[in-house]
Image (cartoon, rainbow, N blue to C red):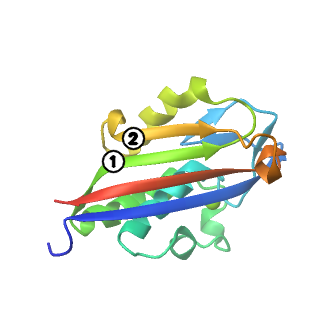
């Protein structure tokens, strides 16, 4: 395979918070009065990592691969998006070196879910959990995230040519 030995990708996502929706982060359902609203399951963390993988190989973005106007993706579990991006990465001869992520959510506090989220993400990506960082921040009650109108996730991924 040709191409540089290392490639880096960055991803970001946001969804609105709404009543009557589940809060699913990294494929893990977190008990909460408000959940993430969207066409799919609105898992911002999986969407950010998917975009980081696509970005590392300049393969466009999640909306290009999975249009939210397509009924096929309505209510879709977002691990399908991540599996697809991972298959593209592997198909181009790369493997994941490490992933670093941040979830910005005002409430609930997420620290008790870190182990489960890391384990689930590591399982999807086929890497050890210690190659995968999940950090949590509040927004200090400022702005749409701080006012619990939305939540955000960011991801950076480094790829190694195999
Ligand atoms: Mg999204």
- The answer to whether residue 80 is visible is no
At a point 21% along the width and 65% down the height, the residue shown is 93
- CB of residue at label 1: within 8 Å of ligand 1? no
At a point 39% along the width and 41% down the height, the residue shown is 132
Ligand 1 sits in quadrant: bottom right
At a point 49% along the width and 63% down the height, the residue shown is 51
At a point 64% along the width and 39% down the height, the residue shown is 137
Residue 138 in the image: x percent, y percent? Answer: 70, 39
Q: In the displayed orientation, state which residue is furthest to the top.
A: 112
> In the rendered image, which quarter is residue 28 located in?
top right
Say if mark 1 contacts mark 2, CB within 8 Å: yes
Q: Quadrant of the N terminus?
A: bottom left
Lower position in the chain sequence, tag 1 or tag 2:
1
Q: Which residue is mark 2?
A: 132
Callout 1: SS: strand
Residue 4 in the image: x percent, y percent? Answer: 21, 71
Residue 102 in the image: x percent, y percent? Answer: 55, 45
Callout 2: SS: strand
Crowdedness of circle 1 by 10 Å Cα count: few (<14), some, many (20+)? some
Q: Which residue is mark 1?
A: 98
Up-down relation of residue 117 to residue 154 (above or below): above
């Amino acid at each position: 395979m040709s191409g540089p030995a290392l490639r880096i990708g960055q991803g970001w996502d946001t969804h609105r918070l709404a009543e009557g929706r589940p809060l699913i982060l990294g494929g893990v359902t977190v008990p909460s009065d408000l959940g993430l609203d969207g066409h799919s399951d609105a898992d911002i963390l999986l969407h950010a990592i998917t975009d980081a993988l696509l970005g590392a190989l300049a393969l466009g973005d999640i909306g290009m691969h999975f249009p939210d106007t397509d009924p096929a993706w309505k209510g879709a579990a977002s691990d399908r998006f991540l599996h697809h991006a991972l298959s593209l990465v592997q198909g181009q001869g790369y493997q994941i070196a490490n992933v670093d992520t941040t979830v910005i959510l005002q409430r609930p506090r997420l620290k008790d879910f870190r182990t489960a989220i890391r384990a689930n993400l590591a399982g999807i990506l086929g890497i050890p959990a210690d190659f995968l960082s999940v950090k949590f921040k509040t927004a200090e009650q400022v702005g749409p995230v701080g006012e619990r109108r939305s939540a955000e996730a960011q991801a950076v991924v480094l790829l190694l040519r195999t």
